[in-house]
Amino acid sequence: MFRRKGFIRPGDPDIPPALRRANELMANGDYPAAAQAFEDLARGAVGRNGPRAPLLLIQAGRMRILAGQVPLGMTHLQQGLGLFAARGQWQRLNNNAQRLMAQLTQRGLVEEARQIETILKASLPLGFVPNRGLAPEKGKRILPATCPGCGGPLHGDEVEWTDEITAECPYCSRAVRAE
Ligand SMILES: [Zn+2]
């Protein structure tokens, strides 16, 4: 992928090559290899109880499903969502589950989408109020579809907004500017 020189500012974190590689495999449509790469990354993150473990598990699950290995993919998705729940990250749990339900339904995996919905309903605390996570007055800002640093997918409701036009990539922590 073309990357503008000078866009990486001093202080940007180093981007793990294995993460960049996993996202490249995903972008190239090599889903079995991408799944393996995300599983390796997720295993490390789970072992460290790292903040990215749930998202990496979800990526591994999505790649297994795209590779046609649906039951294994669903196991990863359930584990990833379960980690969000165990950490009390309810908004992230809800946003990711909703996105997965839409993606599964789109692929005709209606029963699998229903399983995710069941997990979500069983996990969310009473009185949970969804918050789409878009920063106020900048909901119209458009993030690049993928992180210019690591190539990971970016969603406005998933990133942390550090100011009105800057969000942090949830995979590599790089600052990404919205347009
Ligand atoms: Zn990134």
Image (spheres, helix red, strand yellow):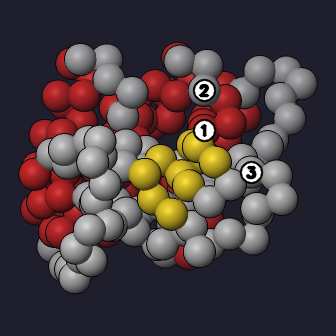
Asked if 20 appears above or below 86 in the picture, the reply is: below
Which residue in the protein does label 1 denote? 92
Q: Nearer the viewer, residue 135 or 133?
A: 135
Ligand 1 is found in which quarter of the picture? bottom left
Q: Residues within 10 Å of mark 1 (few under 14, many from 20)?
A: many
Q: Nearer the viewer, residue 130 or 174?
A: 174
For the N terminus, which image quadrant?
bottom left
What amino acid is found at the position of numbered circle 1 in the picture? Arg
Res. 135 mark: 3
Asked if 38 appears above or below 69 in the picture, the reply is: above
Res. 84 mark: none
Q: Nearer the viewer, mark 3 or mark 2?
A: 3
Residue, x 19% and y 44% (percent of image)?
14
Which residue in the protein does label 2 denote? 89
Percent position of residue 61, x then y = 33, 50
- Left or right of 125? Residue 108 is left
